[in-house]
Image: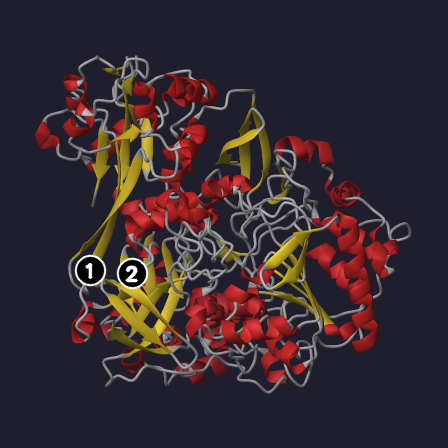
Amino acid sequence: MHGITRRKFLIGSAAGSASLLAASYVNFDAWASREKIQGEVKVTPTLCDACGNWCAIKVHTRGGRIWKAEGIPLAGNNRGRMCAKGHGFLHEVYNPDRIKSPLKRVGPNKFEPISWEQAYKEIGTKVRAISEKYGPGSLFWVSHPQANVQLTQRFMQALKSPNVFSHGSTCFMPRNIGWWLTVGQAKPSMDFENSRMIVLVGRNPAGGMNLGHLRSMTKGRDRGAKVVVIDPRYSEAASMANQWIRIRPGTDLALMLALANVMISEGIYQKEFVEEFTEGFDEFAEEVKKYTPEWAAEKTDVSKQTIVTLAHELAAAAPRAIIHRGYHGAMGTQYKNSLQLVRAVGCVTGLLGNFNQRGGMFFSPKPKLGALDKDAHPNPPRVPGPMADGTGDMERYPLVPRGQGMTQAIPELAIEGKLKAGFVYHTNPLRTVPNPARVIEGYKKLELLVGFDYVLSETASVCHYILPESFYLERDDVIYTNQSVKTKQVSIRQPTIKPMYDTKPLLEILSGMAEHLGIGQYFNFTLDEMNRASLKPVGVTLEQLRKEGVVDLGHEWKPGPPRFNTPSGKLEFVSSILRDYDLPAVPTWEEPLVSPDPKDPHSFRMIHGKQAYHTHTRTCNQPYLMAITTINDAARVWIHPDRAKALGLKDGECMTISSSVGSGRARCRISEGIHPDCIFVPSAYGVFSRHLTHAKKDGGQGGFGFGISYNDFLPTYFSPVLGHAMVNEIVVKVEKTYA
Amino acid sequence: MPRYGIAIDTTKCIGCHACRVACQNQNDLPVHEEFNRIVERERGVFPSFSKEFVPLQCNHCKDAPCERVCPTGATYTSDEGVVLVNTKTCVGCKYCIEACPYKMRTMDHGKGIVVKCRMCIELVREGGTPACVSTCPTQVRIFGDLDDPTSEISRFIAEHRAQPLRADLNTGPRIYYKRS
């Protein structure tokens, strides 16, 4: 059989019945894909795009076809490692359902290919007309913010619209604002490898993958650090931890306040650090007096002894003790009290005195990039005023940063008629924003919706125009600096293969549209020119960066006295900014917005989280990654055995889940690894675009109609201070499905 | 000549399946063929509940049952102790699939032959490590020379008394596990 090409095989099978018999066992697609592509192996360093972390990888091509990839050890962000998503997403470049040219919607779910020039012209004409009729404030851009956000900001600024949104209000916003208020920076880094105690509060870096964190946590653990996971669910991170503290969902804040209570009342905090580098300790100490371990035990369903022991262990390990800075979990947008929780974690970190200490938290050195020459390439004038959703409005949401906004406000504003035209880039709000019925209604109301997508996702399906950006393996991007952890690093994404279809990189698309929008003068440069200008001050040439992928600039972080970029210049137990806005300035207990009824056997809180092999819902149609879901039956919804028994459920049986806004069915996974108050939904599924069927080929599962999403059950919420979506504040009714 | 093996620390495994897909890419495997997989085991009742992810792959047995049953001699052990399949002489009879106590051989339906983990021998001979080892975010796997008492893997096995799975079958597996 060996060395037979597909053509020869076909000839052979036509010639003899024996071969025909063989042919009946062979799936021809599989056969074609199995033929070893021979040819020159080329290795190109670039950045992964399977999730928002942009790990530095080396992509191997063979005969001009993507083959495999591996991590670049130098990169601080992933330290030579690569996750399943990164490996699996490589195959998406050959997804037959990719959008192959600009598309124009000509009917419901009906698209026809058009030329780039036609797309630019028509979009330009329509945007101009809408901007003239309703004002530039009726235009918006929403994206998953990445290095390219510089370009999109520039584009919207040129169009005179302040409305640049990110997905942050459904993801990480309280985490960023909470740390910024407390220590003056949104994302402090963590020196896990030198730590003696690592605590994860509602954060699972083994599910929402962060390879750099995992790598250094493992190193710390190998050196004897104790890893403690505080989570309602026995998360993947818990399986490599020393202790799992099962907490009632939404009550992490109570536990943190009690830790502070124990440490202060027993005098086991880092007194010198508190005296020298913090502000407002006395007021904080007074406030936490009432948060005794007994009180917290009641709230959190964690025993008093466990809380006290944790406080003692943290204090004994301090300052080499870390509480993870959080991400989307409890410290992200999940609860009403998330902001208070982040503030409380920041304050406990202050008690541990670990800032800028070995084995503690620190601020990563970041390279300062250059900019284009302002005379030759003028910046568009800044657009004053708040965003359409009240972001930056001193009366409404003064703490939400411009450029983030509240993504779940877009459909509401569209329904109100305040937003009329928008651009959706690298995000899929129809699936990833709560309350899809409302989101669909809103997005459909827009007079113009332009999407950048590589497949017909839910959002792309309702766009008027789809402009396919070249895939991440086919394009250049803006210089990236987030590889910097302990040293300054710059990295770059570059093409590993030629674009397969009629697609273009973002800057080219923006320039094309700009011509027809009368803002061409702001886009009179190429990406290479921009990247060269960025690299100039750091002394790296574009050629060198292209060759190496990641360049380390040194300037290693060194422990020492910390400096905080807060108004007081210190770590603020009492936040002066919150006080200025008349908000609770000291971390205080705040009840979750909703809670399940303890007497009702059908009442649960619905929580969710990521799996290590899926990114949001965009990988739900990727066969290699969906195979992992299928083999492990991993789309099931977790439920505690006692609660399942009360509902008459056996493992794998179907449940009907309903809330005030939606209902759905899912099979259950009965596990001791979850708090009885809640059910856990993996967040990768529930795709409803009819165009996403690639994963179903060859008997696979995934894509359209597979699984459920927590967003289907979640009302549209805006938290009082930050307007975040409070995505775990769902009470659902769970019943056994009899049908 | 080295004698290669892998030590696996299941207490670090987070079940992320990076090893699975890295291996599939390295070996050009289609979606549903796998050379390694992860089994998830839950134990006990809260508060003494715990979970273990156990990565499985070919154990490259010294006295390999798959090699013994192969009628054409296609399965052989290389000088480095890696159990391989000669794709030219394999006839796809699947005796080896039945004989493998770990059930870690799979059928290549395209070519009609049996395929399996080769410890990425072509990478190893160039001085690299197998794809499943180098991609792992928590460094669950340690690859190295079992005959060299100073190698990382030998020291790891000695220090943690790592054991093969089903050592009682006396097949001399070369994958060692630290499970607690």
Return the chain for callout 2: A
Mark 2 → mark 1, Cα distance in angstroms: 9 Å
User: For the C terminus of chain A, which image quadrant?
Assistant: bottom left
Residue A658 at x, y percent in the picture: 35, 76
Residue B69 at x, y percent in the picture: 15, 19
Residue B122 position (above or below residue A571): above
Q: Name the image quarter holding residue A723.
A: bottom right
**What secondary structure is marked by label 1?**
loop
Q: Residues within 10 Å of mark 1 (few under 14, many from 20)?
A: some
Residue A262 in sight from this viewpoint:
no
Kind of residue at disc 1: Phe
Q: Residue at x 62, y 84 (%)?
A: A581
Which residue is nearer to you in this view: A359 or A68?
A68
Disc sitting over residue A476 in the figure: none
- Relative horizontal placement of residue B11, taking residue B164 as reference (left or right): right
Residue A368 at x, y percent in the picture: 71, 50
Q: Which residue is mark 1?
A: B49
- Relative horizontal placement of residue A247, taking residue A163 as reference (left or right): left
Q: Name the image quarter holding residue A490.
A: top right
Q: Which residue is mark 2?
A: A234
- Verify CB contact (< 8 Å) between mark 2 and mark 1: yes
